[in-house]
Image (cartoon, rainbow, N blue to C red):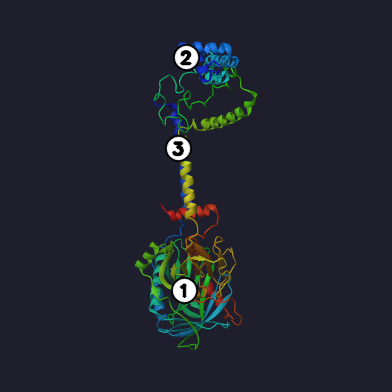
Amino acid sequence: MSTGDPSSGARRPVLAVLLVLIGLCALLLTSAVHPGAHEVPAAGDDDGMPVLRAAAEAEGETPYTAVRQVTGPDGQPYGLRVVNRPGEGVVLAPIGAEDEPFVVEASQALESLDDRLLEMLRDTYRVADAGRTELDGRPARLVEAERADGTVAGRFWVEADSGLLVARTVYDQAGDPALSSNLTELEIGEGEWPERAETGEPWGEALDAQAREDLRSEGWKVDEQLTWNLRLVDARATEHEGHKVVHAVYSDGLSQISLFVQRGKLGSSHASSPSGGYVGTEEGGTGISSGHDTIFGGDVGQYQSMWQADGFVFTVLADAPAGLAGAAVKALPAPEGSGFWARVERGLSRLGPL
Amino acid sequence: MSSEHLGERLSALVDGELGPAEHESALIHLAKCEACRFEADMTRRLKRRLHGLGEPEPDLDFMGRLSSLDGGPGQDGPNPFDPPFGGGGGFGSSPPLGSSRPLGGFPGAPGGLGGEPLAASGPEADPTATPGARAPGTEATGERERADRGGSELLSQLLTPFAGGRYAVAGAAVVTALLGTAFVAGGEAEDAPVVEPRLADYAVEHAVTSRHIPVETSPEGYEPPPGSEVEQAGR
């Protein structure tokens, strides 16, 4: 015989249903802000890393000439003639263009950068040895970079005979190729070195951890990490007309995004046209983010964006899928608005916690 | 002396300030001199008139308004001739400085000061309470007074039910000050130099670190080798 309230039995199911509904609502709300399953470093055995390290060593030991065929999201290829001389550098000459060749001089800084890029690749993705394959009829080794959800983010082909990395493809989240490069007409041996060429080497002032911390304390936006998969792999500085300019390189191991930060503000008529070969989608384009003043998205997988915020001018140059370049841009201070509330919001952020 | 007029002694005669001999002599002169007799008569009349003047009576209209402020007819209101600060308590018996109605009124005291609008029982409540009715010429002033009281009544009605009315006003002031400060702080930094980023130099630096140079798409003269598209897109 029950001595309890007869109505309490009827209330229990209602209470249970309410609790379940509340739990479902909480689950929906939390899942809406929870990062996707792929937005975490991939676990697993990185058995493809030795193959890529061996290819990097071969790049520093083997002279060769080749044609680098680069293909962007539009699938239309273009070519660069490449001459690699270990210890001297790499010559890059556009085929069919009258531009002078560009020489990247060999340096210890670039070798260190290559090592960090490989570390980033290992930390972000599962680097798996996918076995033997063929490329242009030549035997090669295929290495795949897999995301946490098992999708392929990048593929590398290492030629079996020379041990050189002869092809690579970066895929976007949807699985479509975003940027590919393929060495054709490969010939081992020292190629012709151009008599006249534009040369470049990394900016001289390397910024170590303490220097970056000092800059951050002065208000500079030089984060160690932009997104879960974009971490700082190199930071340098130089001066333009007496003003310090910082170059921070972020990468996930597959793509590189360069961030240039300079204190100041843009003039009323700053450069708003594509330059340096970057192909633009004009202002307000859909390549990266429609909220930024100057956006250029390239059909060849190269992006450029420039804006001002918080007393600094930010310029992003990216060789990356549009999604990754967009994530990097959005992780930085948003372009300054001109309305009342935008100014109030900017003022509150400057005042801080008071 | 009989040939001379009384002069200044005339007023002394009227005031009764002359001695017996001079008084007799002055009277004899008045019997003979018509001019002095006329002047003495006028002086006496003036003196009586002055003596006849009493203390000024208060204006009835003013008295009526004053008495109506403290209640209607039949109430035992204060004597209008009492001191203005009430009850004949004298100096110091009035409320101390700062004890007036606070902003938002006295919560929980609807019948007290601030609990109801000021002068709610004034002439508007019962125009017949005062002997002196409002003059037609004062209607405009009355309307203005009513409008002012209406605003006070509205404010009192808005704030009185909300015990934290004063805090709401203070909070609004703080928010306004914060927004103003943020607006000022959010202005463009005047000392920030105008810069023109060197995109060409940036492109070179980026090309060095990425070992890749930006080129125009599909430059004329480049023909990809056949079959090379298959491998670059996948396995």
Chain letter for the residue marked with disc 1 in the picture:
A
Q: Of the numbered discs in the image, which one, if any, rests on residue B72?
A: none
The residue that mark 2 highlights is B18
On the same chain: label 1 and label 2? no
Would you identify the image quadrant in which residue B92 lies? top left
Chain letter for the residue marked with disc 2 in the picture:
B
SS label for mark 1: loop
Mark 1 belongs to which amino acid?
Glu
Give how far across and how far down residue A334 sits, in percent. 50, 59
For disc 1, the neighbor class at 10 Å (few under 14, some 14 to 19, many from 20) is few
On the same chain: label 3 and label 1? no
Q: Is residue B25 above or below residue A328?
A: above
Pointers 3 and 2 in contact (C-beta within 8 Å) = no
Q: Is residue A118 above or below residue B6?
A: below
Between the C-alphas of marks 3 and 1, the distance is 55 Å
One can see residue A154 in this view: yes
Between the C-alphas of marks 1 and 2, the distance is 115 Å
For disc 3, the neighbor class at 10 Å (few under 14, some 14 to 19, many from 20) is few
Chain letter for the residue marked with disc 3 in the picture:
B
- The residue sitting at the right extreme is B136
Give how far across and how far down residue A146 sits, in percent. 45, 66
Would you identify the image quadrant in which residue A94 lies? bottom right
Q: Is residue A218 above or below residue B175?
A: below
Number of dots carrying numbers: 3
SS label for mark 2: loop
Which of these two is toward me, B82 or A122?
Answer: B82
Mark 3 belongs to which amino acid?
Tyr
Q: Of the numbered discs in the image, which one, if any, rests on residue A241?
A: 1
For disc 2, the neighbor class at 10 Å (few under 14, some 14 to 19, many from 20) is some
Mark 2 belongs to which amino acid?
Leu
The residue that mark 3 highlights is B167
Closer to us: mark 3 or mark 2? 2
